[in-house]
Image (tube, rainbow, N blue to C red):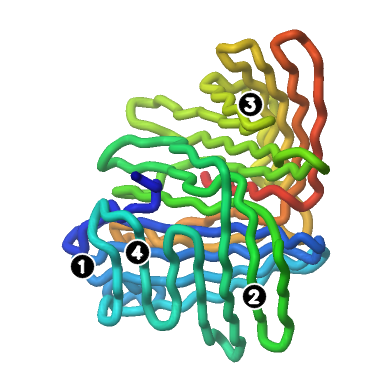
Protein backbone atom coordinates (compact mmCIF):
# COMPACT_ATOMS: atom_id res chain seq x y z
CA UNK A 1 0.00 0.00 0.00
CA UNK A 2 1.39 3.39 -1.00
CA UNK A 3 2.00 5.76 1.88
CA UNK A 4 2.92 8.99 -0.03
CA UNK A 5 6.43 9.03 1.48
CA UNK A 6 8.12 6.77 -1.06
CA UNK A 7 11.31 8.14 -2.62
CA UNK A 8 10.79 9.66 -6.08
CA UNK A 9 14.31 10.86 -6.96
CA UNK A 10 17.07 8.71 -8.36
CA UNK A 11 20.47 9.30 -6.76
CA UNK A 12 21.79 9.91 -10.26
CA UNK A 13 19.50 12.89 -10.88
CA UNK A 14 21.45 16.12 -11.34
CA UNK A 15 18.69 18.65 -10.77
CA UNK A 16 15.93 17.96 -8.28
CA UNK A 17 14.98 18.56 -4.66
CA UNK A 18 13.01 16.17 -2.48
CA UNK A 19 12.07 16.96 1.08
CA UNK A 20 10.30 15.26 3.97
CA UNK A 21 9.19 17.67 6.69
CA UNK A 22 7.46 17.70 10.07
CA UNK A 23 5.66 20.55 11.82
CA UNK A 24 4.89 20.01 15.52
CA UNK A 25 2.88 22.58 17.46
CA UNK A 26 3.56 21.81 21.12
CA UNK A 27 0.52 20.88 23.19
CA UNK A 28 1.55 23.15 26.07
CA UNK A 29 1.54 26.21 23.81
CA UNK A 30 5.23 27.00 24.37
CA UNK A 31 6.11 26.95 20.68
CA UNK A 32 6.48 24.81 17.59
CA UNK A 33 9.20 22.77 15.89
CA UNK A 34 9.87 22.43 12.15
CA UNK A 35 12.11 19.57 10.99
CA UNK A 36 13.23 19.12 7.40
CA UNK A 37 15.13 16.29 5.68
CA UNK A 38 16.35 17.46 2.27
CA UNK A 39 17.84 15.60 -0.71
CA UNK A 40 19.11 17.97 -3.43
CA UNK A 41 20.81 17.31 -6.78
CA UNK A 42 22.41 14.03 -5.64
CA UNK A 43 23.76 13.33 -9.15
CA UNK A 44 25.92 16.48 -9.03
CA UNK A 45 26.78 16.38 -5.31
CA UNK A 46 24.28 19.11 -4.41
CA UNK A 47 25.63 22.50 -5.41
CA UNK A 48 29.33 21.71 -5.23
CA UNK A 49 31.41 24.62 -4.00
CA UNK A 50 28.52 26.18 -2.08
CA UNK A 51 29.02 25.57 1.67
CA UNK A 52 25.22 25.58 2.09
CA UNK A 53 24.59 23.32 -0.89
CA UNK A 54 25.28 19.83 0.45
CA UNK A 55 23.31 17.07 -1.27
CA UNK A 56 21.78 15.89 2.03
CA UNK A 57 20.66 18.35 4.70
CA UNK A 58 18.81 18.18 8.00
CA UNK A 59 17.06 21.31 9.29
CA UNK A 60 15.57 22.08 12.70
CA UNK A 61 13.81 25.35 13.50
CA UNK A 62 12.45 26.33 16.90
CA UNK A 63 9.55 28.80 17.01
CA UNK A 64 9.20 29.90 20.65
CA UNK A 65 5.98 31.61 21.70
CA UNK A 66 6.69 35.33 21.97
CA UNK A 67 10.29 34.96 20.78
CA UNK A 68 12.35 34.88 17.61
CA UNK A 69 12.79 31.60 15.70
CA UNK A 70 16.16 29.82 15.65
CA UNK A 71 17.27 27.64 12.73
CA UNK A 72 19.90 24.92 12.80
CA UNK A 73 21.01 23.38 9.49
CA UNK A 74 23.61 20.68 8.98
CA UNK A 75 24.77 19.37 5.61
CA UNK A 76 26.07 15.91 4.78
CA UNK A 77 27.77 14.22 1.85
CA UNK A 78 26.14 11.26 0.14
CA UNK A 79 28.54 8.94 1.90
CA UNK A 80 26.68 7.32 4.75
CA UNK A 81 23.25 8.00 3.26
CA UNK A 82 20.90 5.07 3.77
CA UNK A 83 17.85 5.65 1.59
CA UNK A 84 15.07 3.23 0.72
CA UNK A 85 14.77 2.30 -2.92
CA UNK A 86 12.75 4.42 -5.30
CA UNK A 87 8.99 3.85 -4.88
CA UNK A 88 9.64 1.32 -2.11
CA UNK A 89 7.39 1.09 0.93
CA UNK A 90 8.03 1.36 3.82
CA UNK A 91 10.21 4.42 3.29
CA UNK A 92 13.31 5.49 5.26
CA UNK A 93 16.10 8.07 5.09
CA UNK A 94 19.08 7.85 7.45
CA UNK A 95 22.18 10.04 7.63
CA UNK A 96 24.59 10.88 10.45
CA UNK A 97 22.34 9.97 13.38
CA UNK A 98 19.27 11.52 11.73
CA UNK A 99 16.44 9.54 10.20
CA UNK A 100 12.82 9.67 9.14
CA UNK A 101 10.47 6.85 8.18
CA UNK A 102 6.76 6.26 7.79
CA UNK A 103 5.68 7.18 11.32
CA UNK A 104 8.73 8.44 13.23
CA UNK A 105 11.73 10.73 12.94
CA UNK A 106 14.91 11.32 14.90
CA UNK A 107 17.67 13.88 14.81
CA UNK A 108 21.04 14.80 16.30
CA UNK A 109 22.59 18.11 15.24
CA UNK A 110 25.47 20.21 16.53
CA UNK A 111 25.38 23.65 14.93
CA UNK A 112 27.03 26.92 16.02
CA UNK A 113 27.61 25.70 19.57
CA UNK A 114 24.07 24.35 19.98
CA UNK A 115 23.01 20.74 20.39
CA UNK A 116 19.59 19.70 19.12
CA UNK A 117 18.11 16.22 19.29
CA UNK A 118 14.67 14.72 18.81
CA UNK A 119 12.92 11.37 18.87
CA UNK A 120 9.32 11.54 17.70
CA UNK A 121 6.55 9.13 16.79
CA UNK A 122 3.39 10.21 15.03
CA UNK A 123 0.03 8.80 14.06
CA UNK A 124 -2.81 10.12 11.95
CA UNK A 125 -6.10 9.17 10.30
CA UNK A 126 -5.91 11.22 7.11
CA UNK A 127 -3.53 11.59 4.19
CA UNK A 128 -3.88 13.50 0.93
CA UNK A 129 -2.06 14.33 -2.31
CA UNK A 130 -2.46 18.07 -2.69
CA UNK A 131 -0.70 18.35 -6.07
CA UNK A 132 0.91 15.84 -8.45
CA UNK A 133 2.42 17.06 -11.73
CA UNK A 134 4.63 14.07 -12.47
CA UNK A 135 8.33 14.82 -12.95
CA UNK A 136 7.61 18.56 -12.53
CA UNK A 137 6.82 18.02 -8.88
CA UNK A 138 4.29 17.10 -6.21
CA UNK A 139 3.02 18.04 -2.77
CA UNK A 140 1.90 15.10 -0.62
CA UNK A 141 0.74 14.91 2.98
CA UNK A 142 1.18 11.41 4.43
CA UNK A 143 0.05 12.61 7.90
CA UNK A 144 -2.43 15.50 7.74
CA UNK A 145 -3.88 15.31 11.27
CA UNK A 146 -0.72 14.11 13.01
CA UNK A 147 -0.49 13.56 16.76
CA UNK A 148 3.11 13.48 18.03
CA UNK A 149 4.71 11.85 21.06
CA UNK A 150 8.32 11.81 22.20
CA UNK A 151 11.02 14.30 23.11
CA UNK A 152 12.88 17.26 21.66
CA UNK A 153 15.97 18.74 23.34
CA UNK A 154 17.58 22.10 22.60
CA UNK A 155 20.80 22.46 24.58
CA UNK A 156 19.61 21.90 28.19
CA UNK A 157 15.90 22.44 27.58
CA UNK A 158 13.70 19.43 26.89
CA UNK A 159 10.16 19.10 25.61
CA UNK A 160 8.52 15.75 26.39
CA UNK A 161 4.96 14.50 26.12
CA UNK A 162 2.40 11.99 24.95
CA UNK A 163 0.93 13.77 23.18
CA UNK A 164 3.81 16.18 22.69
CA UNK A 165 1.99 18.15 20.02
CA UNK A 166 -0.06 18.24 16.84
CA UNK A 167 0.55 19.11 13.21
CA UNK A 168 1.57 17.65 9.89
CA UNK A 169 4.16 15.50 8.09
CA UNK A 170 4.61 16.33 4.44
CA UNK A 171 6.60 15.23 1.39
CA UNK A 172 7.44 17.56 -1.52
CA UNK A 173 9.52 17.14 -4.65
CA UNK A 174 10.32 19.12 -7.78
CA UNK A 175 12.63 19.77 -10.72
CA UNK A 176 12.79 23.34 -9.45
CA UNK A 177 11.06 25.45 -6.82
CA UNK A 178 8.09 27.45 -8.05
CA UNK A 179 8.52 31.18 -8.65
CA UNK A 180 5.77 31.85 -6.13
CA UNK A 181 3.69 29.81 -3.75
CA UNK A 182 1.51 30.16 -0.67
CA UNK A 183 0.92 27.15 1.53
CA UNK A 184 -0.86 26.74 4.84
CA UNK A 185 -1.84 23.96 7.19
CA UNK A 186 -4.03 24.41 10.26
CA UNK A 187 -4.93 21.95 13.01
CA UNK A 188 -8.09 22.67 15.02
CA UNK A 189 -8.48 20.44 18.11
CA UNK A 190 -12.06 19.89 19.30
CA UNK A 191 -12.88 18.53 22.74
CA UNK A 192 -14.50 15.12 22.55
CA UNK A 193 -14.41 15.07 18.74
CA UNK A 194 -11.85 14.38 16.05
CA UNK A 195 -9.66 17.30 15.03
CA UNK A 196 -10.41 19.38 11.96
CA UNK A 197 -7.53 20.15 9.59
CA UNK A 198 -7.22 22.49 6.64
CA UNK A 199 -4.45 22.49 4.05
CA UNK A 200 -4.30 24.95 1.15
CA UNK A 201 -1.81 25.50 -1.67
CA UNK A 202 -1.44 28.08 -4.45
CA UNK A 203 1.49 28.23 -6.88
CA UNK A 204 2.46 29.36 -10.35
CA UNK A 205 2.29 27.02 -13.32
CA UNK A 206 3.49 27.34 -16.93
CA UNK A 207 1.65 29.53 -19.46
CA UNK A 208 0.48 31.95 -16.79
CA UNK A 209 -1.75 29.42 -15.05
CA UNK A 210 -2.11 29.21 -11.27
CA UNK A 211 -2.72 26.03 -9.24
CA UNK A 212 -5.21 26.41 -6.40
CA UNK A 213 -6.53 23.75 -4.04
CA UNK A 214 -7.67 23.42 -0.43
CA UNK A 215 -8.58 20.25 1.45
CA UNK A 216 -10.60 20.18 4.66
CA UNK A 217 -10.97 17.21 6.99
CA UNK A 218 -14.02 17.72 9.19
CA UNK A 219 -15.94 15.13 11.22
CA UNK A 220 -14.05 12.41 9.37
CA UNK A 221 -15.13 13.65 5.93
CA UNK A 222 -12.89 15.13 3.24
CA UNK A 223 -13.96 18.29 1.40
CA UNK A 224 -11.96 19.38 -1.66
CA UNK A 225 -12.03 22.99 -2.86
CA UNK A 226 -10.51 23.75 -6.28
CA UNK A 227 -11.83 27.24 -6.82
CA UNK A 228 -10.44 29.77 -4.40
CA UNK A 229 -11.03 33.49 -4.13
CA UNK A 230 -8.02 35.01 -2.40
CA UNK A 231 -9.76 37.85 -0.58
CA UNK A 232 -6.56 39.15 0.99
CA UNK A 233 -2.86 38.30 0.76
CA UNK A 234 -0.16 40.31 2.57
CA UNK A 235 3.23 38.78 1.85
CA UNK A 236 5.19 41.38 3.82
CA UNK A 237 3.28 40.62 7.03
CA UNK A 238 2.51 37.00 6.11
CA UNK A 239 -1.27 37.06 6.14
CA UNK A 240 -3.63 35.12 3.88
CA UNK A 241 -7.41 35.15 3.50
CA UNK A 242 -9.44 33.16 1.01
CA UNK A 243 -12.94 31.91 0.29
CA UNK A 244 -13.88 28.74 -1.53
CA UNK A 245 -16.78 26.39 -2.23
CA UNK A 246 -16.93 22.64 -2.83
CA UNK A 247 -19.14 20.84 -5.31
CA UNK A 248 -21.22 19.41 -2.46
CA UNK A 249 -22.32 22.92 -1.44
CA UNK A 250 -19.97 23.33 1.53
CA UNK A 251 -18.43 26.82 1.70
CA UNK A 252 -15.36 27.95 3.58
CA UNK A 253 -13.82 31.25 4.63
CA UNK A 254 -10.28 31.07 6.03
CA UNK A 255 -7.81 33.54 7.54
CA UNK A 256 -4.23 32.62 8.46
CA UNK A 257 -1.97 35.11 10.23
CA UNK A 258 1.76 34.43 10.24
CA UNK A 259 2.94 37.89 11.27
CA UNK A 260 4.59 38.93 14.50
CA UNK A 261 7.76 37.75 16.19
CA UNK A 262 7.47 34.17 14.87
CA UNK A 263 7.79 35.19 11.22
CA UNK A 264 10.98 33.60 9.94
CA UNK A 265 12.94 34.13 6.71
CA UNK A 266 15.39 31.60 5.32
CA UNK A 267 17.28 31.31 2.00
CA UNK A 268 16.56 28.25 -0.15
CA UNK A 269 19.14 27.32 -2.78
CA UNK A 270 17.88 27.01 -6.36
CA UNK A 271 18.24 23.58 -7.92
CA UNK A 272 20.22 25.05 -10.83
CA UNK A 273 22.73 26.35 -8.22
CA UNK A 274 22.46 29.90 -9.63
CA UNK A 275 21.71 31.44 -6.24
CA UNK A 276 19.06 31.45 -3.56
CA UNK A 277 15.66 32.94 -2.82
CA UNK A 278 13.84 33.90 0.38
CA UNK A 279 11.19 31.71 1.99
CA UNK A 280 8.98 33.29 4.64
CA UNK A 281 7.58 30.79 7.14
CA UNK A 282 5.73 30.97 10.43
CA UNK A 283 5.14 27.57 12.00
CA UNK A 284 3.43 29.20 14.98
CA UNK A 285 0.70 31.00 13.06
CA UNK A 286 -2.92 31.57 14.04
CA UNK A 287 -5.88 30.59 11.90
CA UNK A 288 -9.65 30.80 11.83
CA UNK A 289 -12.25 29.28 9.54
CA UNK A 290 -15.97 29.71 9.06
CA UNK A 291 -17.48 26.55 7.62
CA UNK A 292 -20.92 26.76 6.06
CA UNK A 293 -22.63 23.43 5.51
CA UNK A 294 -24.80 22.75 2.47
CA UNK A 295 -27.91 23.47 4.56
CA UNK A 296 -26.56 26.89 5.59
CA UNK A 297 -25.49 26.16 9.17
CA UNK A 298 -22.21 28.00 10.03
CA UNK A 299 -19.46 26.66 12.30
CA UNK A 300 -16.44 28.68 13.41
CA UNK A 301 -13.10 27.22 14.49
CA UNK A 302 -9.97 29.04 15.68
CA UNK A 303 -6.43 28.26 16.77
CA UNK A 304 -3.88 30.75 18.08
CA UNK A 305 -0.76 28.60 17.55
CA UNK A 306 -1.88 25.55 15.53
CA UNK A 307 -1.12 26.71 12.00
CA UNK A 308 1.81 27.10 9.64
CA UNK A 309 1.92 29.61 6.79
CA UNK A 310 4.60 29.85 4.11
CA UNK A 311 4.96 32.35 1.26
CA UNK A 312 7.42 32.84 -1.58
CA UNK A 313 7.49 35.42 -4.36
In the image, what residue occupies the spot 77% across and 26% down? 290
Q: Marks 1 and 3, how far apart in space?
A: 39 Å
Residue farthest toward the bottom in the current orientation of the protein: 113
Asked whether the residues under the numbered discs 4 and 1 touch, taking CB atoms below 8 Å apart as contact, a structural biologist would say: no
Residue in front for this viewpoint, 197 or 135: 197
Residue 246 visible to the viewer: yes
Counting other residues with Cα less than 10 Å from the Cα at mark 4, is it few (<14), some (14-19), or many (20 or more)? many
Considering every residue shown, the one lying at the far left of the view is 12
Q: Which mark is residue 170?
A: none
Q: Which residue is mark 3?
A: 230
Say which mark, if any, is on residue 39. 4
| Residue 65 image position (x, y, % from top left) | 80, 64
Q: Secondary structure at mark 1?
A: helix
Q: Are marks 1 and 2 in contact (CB under 8 Å)?
A: no
Comes first in the chain, label 2 or label 3 = 2
Q: Comparing marks 4 and 1, which lies closer to the viewer?
A: 4
How far apart marks 4 and 1 lie (CA) works out to 12 Å
Question: Which disc is residue 152 wearing?
Answer: 2
For the residues labelled 2 and 3, say whether their Cβ atoms are less than 8 Å apart. no
The residue at the point 57 percent across, 35 percent down is 200
Comes first in the chain, label 4 or label 1: 4
Amino acid sequence: MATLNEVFSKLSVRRRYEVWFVRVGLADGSGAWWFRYLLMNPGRDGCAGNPHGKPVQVWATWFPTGGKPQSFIQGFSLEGLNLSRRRQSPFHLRIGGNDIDEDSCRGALEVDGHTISWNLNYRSTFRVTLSDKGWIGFSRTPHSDAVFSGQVTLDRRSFTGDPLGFGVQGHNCGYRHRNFWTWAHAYFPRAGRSATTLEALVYEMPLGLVFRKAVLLHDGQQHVFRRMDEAGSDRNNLRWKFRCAARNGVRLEAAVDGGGSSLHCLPYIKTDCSGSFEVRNNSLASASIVLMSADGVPETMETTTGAVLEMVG
